[in-house]
Image: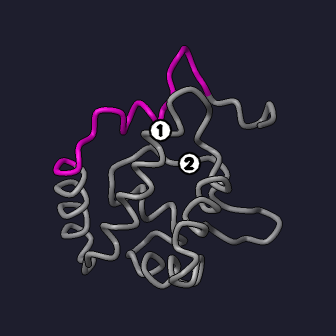
C-alpha cells in the first residue's frame, strides 16, 4: 500500500465501518430494495458475489485501507475464476442501469461508500 491509498480519516475506515455490523439479511434487503428502485433484475448469482465481497470487507478491511478498487477486483476475479473471473463478473454487473463496471454497481446496490480509483484514467475502464 502506498501513501496515495492511505484513506483513513480521523480514525475511520469507511468500507469496514459500513459493513462491520451488517448481517446477511440486512445486506440482502438493501440490495433487493436498491435493485428494485433501479429496475434491475436481481438474481441469486448477483447476491452471491455481493455477499462474497462484503464478507471480504468484513474480514480484511478491519485494520487497513480498503478504498482502492484494484485489490477488491482481483479478489473477486480469483474467487470466481472457475466461472470465468472478470468476464463472469462483468456479465453480471455491467447491466446495472447508470453504473458501469463491477465494483461500482455492487457498492451502489449494497449502499456502500464509493471506492477510490474505480476508473483508470489511462485506459478509461471501470472495475
Classify residue 33 as left or right of residue 86. left
Q: Which residues are magenta?
A: 8-26
Observer-nearest residue: 116 or 56?
56
Which image quadrant: the N terminus? Answer: top right
**Residue at x 79%, y 71% (from the top left corner):** 123
Residue receiving disc 2: 115
Q: Identify the image quadrant of residue 31.
A: bottom left
Q: Position of residue 90 (x, y in %)?
A: 52, 79
Numbered disc 2: secondary structure: loop
Colouring scheme applied when the structure was drawn: one colour
Can you say which quadrant of the picture contains the C terminus? bottom right
Looking at the picture, how far across and down is residue 84, in whole percent? 56, 84
Residue matched to label 1: 15
Relative height, residue 42 to residue 11 (above, below): below
The answer to whether 99 appears left or right of 86 in the picture is left
Nearest to viewer (mark 1 / mark 2): 1
Q: Are marks 1 and 2 in contact (CB under 8 Å)?
A: yes
Q: Looking at this view, is 57 or 2 the one in front?
A: 57
**2, above or below 24, in the image:** above
The mark that comes first in sequence, 1 or 2, is 1
**Above-or-below relation of 105 to 72:** below
Residue occupying the point 60% across, 24% down: 8
Amino acid at each position: 500500500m502506498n501513501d496515495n491509498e492511505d484513506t483513513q480519516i480521523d480514525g475511520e475506515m469507511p468500507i469496514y465501518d459500513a459493513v462491520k455490523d451488517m448481517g446477511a439479511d440486512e445486506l440482502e434487503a438493501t440490495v433487493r430494495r436498491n435493485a428494485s428502485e433501479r429496475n434491475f433484475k436481481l438474481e441469486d448469482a448477483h447476491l452471491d458475489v455481493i455477499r462474497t465481497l462484503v464478507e471480504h470487507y468484513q474480514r480484511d478491511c478491519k485494520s487497513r485501507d480498503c478504498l482502492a478498487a484494484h485489490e477488491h477486483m482481483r479478489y473477486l476475479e480469483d474467487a470466481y475464476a472457475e466461472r470465468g473471473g472478470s468476464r463472469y463478473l462483468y456479465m453480471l454487473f455491467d447491466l446495472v442501469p447508470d453504473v458501469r463496471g463491477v465494483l461500482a454497481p455492487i457498492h451502489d446496490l449494497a449502499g456502500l461508500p464509493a471506492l477510490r480509483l474505480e476508473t483508470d484514467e489511462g485506459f478509461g475502464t471501470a472495475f
